[in-house]
């Protein structure tokens, strides 16, 4: 085991002092001291003693100066080690800045160079602290995955987003937290799929929350396994659950009626155009409630609204999954029946009219309304608006005849395009 530095320095100083004391009598003769005095044992002994005292004094001075500086450096290194040993405090900013531990540089010698190097280390640690603070303070979750899909690092923001602590996720396989249908992101062996050749990719996954349920995360993946400073798959995840829910609500509101929850006119037109684009015969049933205005005028619109809200539940059980019932506005409703004959459409309309003939209970009142239904059937490419217009003509025919249900008949259509052309010709004439 090597000897300690200061004992070796003491031995060196003693040897140096003895050497100086042994040689000094010869220098004394050169300085004019008579040889009879310079070579006496007493003079030589005095020179050796003086050399030892001088060496001891140098040793004490060196130990005080160097030892004090070294003790300061050792104490500061201990403080830095204590701070670096708690990365959470270092990242959160609760620990004092490590640059406060800097050592003053009083010289350019070896001790000054050591102090300068130590201060440079503190600066590097402070930069790392700031970087960790940014990583842990961001709302996004940063994760490093090993080759076998385990969590090597996760930022503190995971607790805010998913409720898990960093310790609970450390070394856990990422697939344990994913929705079962999202397990395609890992191979059968558990390794994450990185899509080699693509430097990064963005995808949506559902991740289990510590309190139960799942959150939708938008994940950006970057393969950094070849980077020696990272050597892992870098994931940056952002919680988009609220954003997706808002988008879903907005999309639903754009295609559904607020009062009844049924599809609206836009949804019916889109579905009708989709059906008419194929070789499917389509029936359109247009319904208008009779005596509904009396309900609004007598009891108020709140009663009328609650009556309208019961229309959908009355009609839906009588329809197929491929059929569509929608509210067009006011007390007007429409139904799409794909792949039916005119006779089948008329029979379905009669069944729906019977269902709506039963009284509607609203806050202790039993409200009776009737309904007139117009039916139009078409096939092949065309405009759904044309079928709606024909069903509207048939519905008003049903009102006039008080028959309840009428199929569209071109002979009763007083508003066809040919009539408009004839009226234009007569006006010009």
Image (cartoon, rainbow, N blue to C red):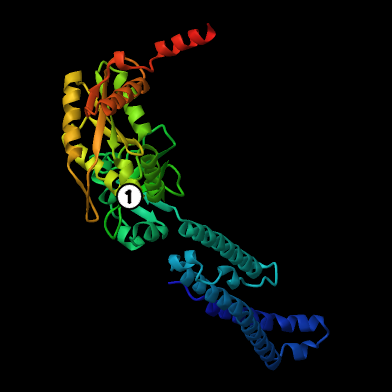
Quadrant of image for the N terminus: bottom left
**Closest to the observer, 131 or 412:** 412
Against 286, residue 135 (above or below) is: below
Instruction: Give how far across and how far down residue 396 sits, in percent.
Output: 31, 26
Q: Give the tally of numbered discs.
A: 1
Q: Residue pushed farthest right?
A: 32
**Closest to the observer, 316 or 410:** 410
Residue with the mark numbered 1:
298
Residue 224 in sight from this viewpoint = no
Q: Is residue 313 left or right of residue 140?
A: left
Instruction: Give how far across and how far down residue 72 sits, in percent.
Output: 58, 77
Instruction: Give how far across and how far down residue 247 sits, in percent.
Output: 40, 43
Q: Residue pushed farthest top?
A: 429
Residue 277 in sight from this viewpoint = yes
Residue shown at 16%/22% (left/top)?
344
Residue shown at 29%/42% (left/top)?
191
Residue 356, image quadrant: top left
**Closest to the observer, 134 or 24:** 134
Residue shown at 77%/90% (left/top)?
36
Against 234, residue 8 (above or below) is: below
């Amino acid at each position: 085991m090597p000897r300690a530095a200061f004992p070796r320095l003491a031995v060196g100083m003693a040897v140096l002092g003895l050497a100086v004391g042994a040689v000094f009598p010869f220098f004394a003769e050169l300085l004019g001291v008579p040889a009879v005095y310079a070579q006496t044992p007493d003079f030589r002994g005095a020179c050796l003693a003086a050399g030892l005292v001088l060496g001891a004094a140098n040793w004490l001075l060196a130990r005080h100066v160097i030892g004090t500086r070294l003790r300061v450096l050792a104490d500061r290194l201990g403080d830095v080690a204590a701070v670096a040993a708690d990365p959470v405090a270092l990242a959160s900013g609760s620990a004092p800045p490590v640059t406060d531990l800097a050592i003053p540089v009083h010289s350019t010698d070896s001790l000054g160079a050591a102090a300068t190097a130590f201060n440079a280390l503190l600066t590097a640690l402070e930069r790392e602290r700031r970087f960790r603070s940014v990583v842990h303070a961001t709302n996004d979750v940063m994760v490093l995955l090993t080759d076998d899909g385990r969590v090597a690092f996760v930022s503190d923001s995971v607790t805010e987003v998913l409720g898990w602590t960093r310790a609970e996720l450390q070394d856990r396989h990422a697939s344990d937290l994913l929705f079962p249908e999202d397990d395609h992101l890992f191979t059968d062996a558990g390794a994450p799929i990185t899509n080699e050749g693509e430097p990064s990719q963005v995808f949506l996954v559902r991740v289990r929350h510590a309190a139960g349920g799942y959150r939708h995360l938008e994940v950006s993946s970057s393969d950094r396994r070849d980077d020696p400073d990272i050597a892992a798959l870098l994931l940056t995840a952002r919680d988009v659950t609220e954003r997706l829910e808002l988008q879903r609500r907005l999309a639903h509101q754009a295609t559904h009626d607020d009062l009844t929850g049924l599809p609206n006119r836009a949804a019916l037109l889109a579905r009708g155009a989709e059906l008419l684009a194929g070789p499917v015969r389509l029936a359109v049933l247009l319904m208008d409630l009779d005596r509904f205005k009396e309900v609004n005028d007598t009891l108020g619109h709140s009663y009328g609204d609650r009556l309208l809200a019961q229309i959908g539940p009355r009609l839906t059980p009588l329809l197929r999954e491929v059929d569509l019932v929608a509210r067009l506005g006011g007390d007007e409703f429409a139904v799409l029946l794909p792949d039916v004959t005119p006779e089948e459409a008329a029979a379905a309309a009669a069944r729906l009219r019977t269902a709506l003939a039963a009284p509607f209970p609203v806050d202790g009142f039993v409200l009776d309304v009737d309904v007139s239904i117009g039916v139009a059937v078409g096939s092949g490419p065309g405009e759904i608006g044309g079928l709606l217009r024909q069903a509207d003509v048939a519905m008003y025919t049903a009102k006039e005849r008080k028959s309840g249900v009428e199929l569209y008949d071109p002979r009763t259509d007083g508003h066809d395009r040919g009539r408009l052309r004839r009226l234009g010709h007569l006006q010009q004439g």
